[in-house]
Image: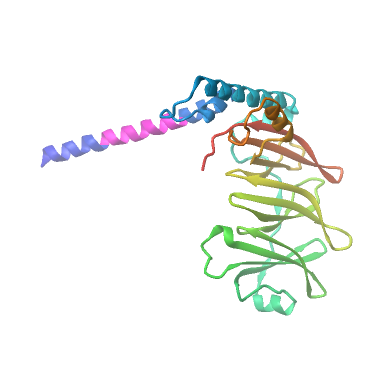
Amino acid sequence: MKSNRKTRIILYSFLGVVAVACGIVLIFWDSIGDAIVLKSRITAYAKVSPTTIVSAEDQKSNDDYINIVSEWIENKNNNCPEIVKRYATRKFVFPKIRTVEKYFKGSKISIEEALKMGVKPDLEKREVVSVEKVTIRNNVFLKVEYHEKGLEHSWGEYEAQLYLLENNVAKYLINGGIFKDAVSFVNLGKNSLDFIEVSTSGGGSGYGECLYMLDSDKKLKEMLAIGTWQCCGRFYEDIDGDGTAEVINTSRIFYPDDLIKILEAEKKDYVLGPFVHSLTIYKWQAGEFKKLGEYYSIKPMEK
């Protein structure tokens, strides 16, 4: 019995050491991966299966293709504004510092009360999750969040309706939908307006986001529209430290038109190639969003 117990202790100790070693290797590997040069990332991404027989002609065509895409990305990134380049080449993580944006929250009211105000959700097909009354400066909004009946556990089945409340009467403004909080209210900090943030499904793993303002006629005016696709996202961060958060959008994208023209001129098939990823930064300046720049890369599609 003592021998078996000793054997188990040794075995568990060994497994613990292996687990720690694996964790260290993964951390080290992640750091190495961040340091891989662009062409190496593209080459690794474009490798064919070891079991596939590739002719010398096909291999040369593939190498030429890699070089064209690599050169295009390198030229674009070399001309990218320094503030965008600095941000994009750091480790791709969601920011944890210098975020200055403020989300507005309201108070919950009953759906019965909202119905009396004129809210009209389709209660035959949808089930109301919550009704929130939000006051921002002199405007009062009603946000009705719901999901299709029987699909309450599906993250992609949430929708929201936004109403403006005037004289206790709800005036419909817009629909949003893909996940919870598809409609939100955000201020980006110093010199920023109060924006209405609306997310909409783009099909599959894509979705769109728009930032609106309420104009003097009490109508929504689109100030910024962005799209996000495949395991990426939009977030806010004050990257220049001026007290106003920038809008940072990362997304997998189709090849831009100028790259397509280059590939077509070289008779290269761009449809079967890897997808380009982009990181784009927008800044609120002088009453509008200005695009500071866009940085490109080839990244493995991680889940």
Do we see residue 36 in this rendering?
no
Question: Residue at left 53%, top 22%?
Answer: 59
Between residue 274 and residue 211, name the one nearer to us.
274
What percent of the width, then of the height, locates residue 249? 68, 42
Would you say the magenta stretch is mainly helix, strand or loop?
A: helix
Q: Is residue 283 magenta?
A: no
Image quadrant where residue 53 sits: top left
Between residue 25 and residue 68, name the one nearer to us.
68
Q: Is residue 213 above or below residue 263?
A: below
What percent of the width, then of the height, locates residue 63? 57, 22
Q: Residue 63 vs residue 21: left or right?
A: right
Q: Residue 245 vs residue 5: left or right?
A: right
Q: Residue 28 vs residue 124: left or right?
A: left
What percent of the width, then of the height, locates residue 38? 60, 25
Q: Is residue 57 above or below residue 237?
A: above
Between residue 299 and residue 57, name the one nearer to us.
57
Colour scheme of the picture: rainbow
Where does the N terminus fall, quadrant-wise? top left
Disc tally is 0
The residue furthest right is 216
Question: Residue at left 60%, top 22%?
Answer: 64
What percent of the width, then of the height, locates residue 262? 71, 27
The residue furthest left is 1
Between residue 10 and residue 248, name the one nearer to us.
248
Q: Is residue 15 magenta?
A: yes
Which stretch is magenta?
A: 13-27
